[in-house]
């Protein structure tokens, strides 16, 4: 029996605005087991952060209209009382935010901020909580945690602040940890340290982790499963292996082709995705990606009119695209060939 | 540390070819730290850039990479003379521009232009696109044949924007389009040298590739010379002909792109490259595995008080006594590949 911790089904988060209804998240489903990591990838405005805030119950107090199901360990969170969600938040589920400088309070010491969640969720005194905070700081690799706990956020470097944020999230041993762009503000060498830390802590606590990022490299390093989002919808969902080795959605192909890669031969030219991500008020009809898709003309007009359902492209690997299996294989092969030609053209040029 | 300007006569020995468009020798910038209000005393200096040498040939691209605080942005600002160098020499087209006055510098601004990182804060929200892109023409009192408006519209077309959008404001454009506006403004005066400071780091992945391709096309079309400052090693590899790796204000390695990426010599470069997350999951028996990489501990030391001798020795796994006492000079190990390290990697000696 799979040890499912989080089950999200047909989650929709809509925001009514004076310009129209913003469908920030529009029908997202996934499930996550303990000890597993899900990577949610997408560009800005794809709804990845709204999803994570929705799971954490942080849309309370806004005019968000949330429908669907979010089941954490069998307990329904959509429609749960704010008080109940608050009990779970920080203890059973916790979040690491993107920008550690603006997520930490400048007036309180690091130690006090980490101890706060522990104080709220446990019947303990301040001294115990402070000691716990020092323990956690040590656990996330802050040197001399006892004295550093009395420092203020400005006395910490960017990497150390992110470590402190992680310590804060871990203060009550959460079973679900959501990391929203945990390393975007950091340098590569520090990023590598933080990714290692998340990895180690997950092994130690056996928690389920959702990592949200626009960096395909980061998800590839950490994730078991990958969910690619576009314009609030799921474009592709599958194991990390499948998604990277046999991506099923032209958007995923585009993302992979448009990033320069350090691990492969240098391409003479990148293959970008044309156009820009759509506005969520005016999501294109049919497949939201069709105005930017090279292959939208091959589906007999269905891309323009019909929202594609998620379909299995291989066992356990879903993609929302109207292309038939044969078309997909053919176009994918052509695209890979195009890339290889671009890199070999350069190599022969270089030798000449 | 500052080199008197008059004695910097070794230009020929550094960078090789004398026909470089831009040649920088011993470039140094120290920001003084003062204490007191009436009697301001200098109590220290941030050594942001220290004794940096490089040259760029016409039509070529030099990439400056490094982590935050390594001095790459300061270097860019020194080149464009937005900051006054503390020492060293900047030669542009064989002419010493290190200490030119504002007035004497003005005609040269036509030839040296800059692209800024953040397309949101680098465009004045109260000016129209036409006003922004035409500003350099008006300021330099350039008379164009067809008038400023037609010229601006040509520029907009050149960077892939709709010339009809002349009267729109920056907020009506997406991030990628704004960066194109910034590029159009940069191109208005037909510069010879463009210093691009993190030109794509604020953009989404799919848009990054568009802007990178645009920069490359413009270079081919207009014969531009670029100095590209970036922290993303994959982007730098894609656009640069030569790459300089900076650490704490110093260039630690400088080589041709292919040479550098195929066989980095400086331990810092090696670590930096291995820290880049790669979008290819590592799997053994269906279980995700951690990628093997060199892990640097700690953060970059403060440039206020950089470590003596080799500045990298505090984080280097190969550091020995000599690294703490003697500064390694930037020497040419093999033709066209210069490294500042006592124990370089990827050499016959280090293979033992």
Image (cartoon, coloured by chain):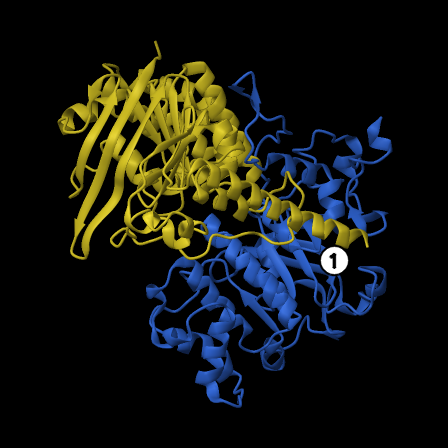
Chain colours: A yellow, B blue
Vertical arrangement, residue A8 with respect to residue B6, above or below: above
Where A312 falls versus B335 (above or below)? above
Kindly indicate the quadrant of the structure image that contains residue B56.
bottom right
Image quadrant assignment for residue B128:
bottom left
B90 left or right of B148?
A: right
Depth check, front residue: B313 or B192: B192
Give the residue at x 59% y 67%: B218
Q: Which residue is mark 1?
A: B53
Q: In this view of the protein, which residue sits in the foreground, A154 or A97? A: A97
State which quarter of the image contains the N terminus of chain A: top left
Assign a secondary structure to mark 1: strand
Measured from the top left, where is residue B310 in percent x and y? 73, 41
- Local packing at callout 1 (Cα closer than 10 Å; few below 14, some 14-19, many 20+) is many
Between B220 and B173, which is closer to the camera in this rendering? B220
Residue lying farthest to the top in this orientation: A1
Looking at the image, can residue B309 be seen? no
- Image-based side of B23 in relation to A308, left or right: right
Q: Locate the C terminus of chain A by quadrant.
A: bottom right
- The answer to whether A74 is drawn above or below residue A106 in the figure is above
Instruction: Give x and y (percent) for residue B254.
Output: 74, 50
Residue beneath the point at 43% across and 35% down: A182
Mark 1 belongs to chain: B
| Residue at x 47% of width, y 41% of height | A327
Residue B83 % position (x, y): 58, 65
Residue A305: x and y in percent read 28, 50
Image: B114 above or below A150: below
Residue pictured at 61% horizontal, 58% vertical? B228
Snapshot quadrant of residue B267? top right
């Amino acid at each position: 029996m799979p040890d499912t911790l989080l089950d999200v089904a047909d989650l929709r988060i809509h925001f009514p605005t004076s310009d129209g209804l913003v469908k920030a998240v529009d029908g997202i489903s996934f499930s996550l087991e303990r000890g597993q990591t899900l990577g949610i990838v997408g560009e800005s405005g794809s709804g990845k952060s709204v999803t994570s805030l929705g799971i954490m119950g942080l849309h309370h107090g806004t005019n968000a209209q949330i429908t669907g199901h979010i089941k954490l360990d069998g307990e329904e969170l959509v429609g749960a009382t704010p008080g109940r969600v608050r009990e779970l938040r920080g203890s059973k589920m916790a979040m690491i935010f993107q920008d550690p400088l603006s997520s930490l309070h400048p007036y309180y010491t690091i130690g006090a901020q980490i101890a706060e969640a522990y104080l709220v969720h446990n019947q303990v005194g301040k001294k115990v909580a402070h000691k716990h905070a020092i323990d956690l700081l040590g656990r996330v690799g802050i040197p001399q945690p006892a004295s550093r706990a009395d420092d203020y956020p400005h006395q910490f470097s960017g990497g150390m602040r992110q470590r402190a944020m992680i310590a804060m999230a871990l203060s009550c041993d959460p079973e679900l940890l959501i990391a929203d762009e945990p390393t975007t503000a950091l340098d590569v060498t520090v990023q590598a340290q933080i990714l290692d830390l998340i990895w180690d802590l997950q092994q130690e606590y056996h928690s389920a982790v959702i990592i949200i990022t626009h960096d395909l490299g980061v998800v590839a390093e950490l994730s078991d499963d990958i969910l690619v989002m576009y314009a609030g919808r799921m474009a592709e969902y599958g194991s990390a292996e499948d998604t990277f080795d046999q991506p099923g959605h032209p958007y995923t192909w585009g993302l992979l082709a448009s990033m320069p890669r350090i691990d492969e031969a240098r391409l003479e030219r990148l293959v970008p995705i044309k156009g820009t991500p759509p506005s969520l008020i005016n999501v294109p009809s049919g497949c939201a990606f069709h105005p930017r898709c090279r292959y939208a003309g091959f589906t007999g007009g269905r891309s323009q009119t019909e929202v594609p359902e998620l379909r299995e492209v291989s066992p356990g690997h879903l993609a929302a695209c109207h292309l038939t299996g044969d078309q997909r294989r053919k176009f994918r092969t052509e695209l890979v060939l195009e890339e290889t030609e671009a890199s070999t053209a350069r190599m022969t040029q270089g030798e000449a | 540390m500052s080199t008197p300007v008059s004695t910097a006569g070794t230009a020929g020995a550094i960078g090789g070819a004398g026909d470089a468009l831009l040649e920088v020798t011993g470039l140094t910038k120290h920001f003084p730290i003062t204490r007191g209000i009436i009697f301001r005393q200098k109590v220290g200096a941030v050594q942001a850039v220290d004794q940096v040498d490089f040259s760029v040939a016409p039509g070529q691209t030099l990439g400056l990479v490094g982590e935050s605080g390594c001095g790459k942005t300061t270097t860019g600002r020194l080149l464009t003379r937005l900051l006054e160098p503390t020492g060293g020499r900047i030669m542009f087209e064989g002419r010493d521009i290190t200490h030119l006055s504002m007035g004497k510098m003005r005609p040269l601004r036509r030839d040296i232009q800059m692209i800024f990182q953040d397309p949101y804060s680098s465009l004045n929200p109260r000016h129209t696109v036409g006003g922004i892109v035409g500003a350099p023409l008006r300021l330099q009192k350039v008379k164009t044949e067809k008038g400023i408006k037609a010229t601006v519209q040509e520029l907009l077309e050149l960077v892939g924007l709709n010339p009809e959008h002349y009267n729109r404001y920056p907020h009506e454009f997406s991030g990628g389009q704004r960066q194109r506006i910034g590029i159009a403004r940069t191109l208005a005066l037909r510069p010879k040298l463009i210093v691009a400071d993190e030109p794509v780091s604020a953009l989404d992945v799919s848009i990054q590739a568009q802007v990178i391709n645009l920069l490359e096309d413009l270079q081919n079309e207009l014969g531009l010379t670029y100095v590209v400052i970036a922290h993303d090693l994959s982007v730098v590899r894609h656009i640069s002909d030569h790459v300089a790796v900076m650490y704490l204000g110093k260039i630690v390695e400088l080589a041709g792109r292919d040479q550098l990426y195929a066989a980095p010599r400086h331990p810092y470069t090696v670590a930096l490259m291995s820290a880049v997350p790669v979008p290819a999951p590592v799997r053994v028996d269906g279980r995700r595995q951690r990628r093997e990489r060199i892990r640097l501990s700690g953060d970059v030391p403060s440039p206020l008080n950089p470590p003596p001798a080799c500045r990298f020795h505090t984080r280097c796994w190969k550091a020995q006594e000599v690294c703490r006492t003697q500064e390694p000079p930037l020497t040419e190990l093999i033709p066209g590949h210069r490294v500042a390290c006592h124990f370089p990697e990827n050499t016959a000696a280090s293979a033992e």
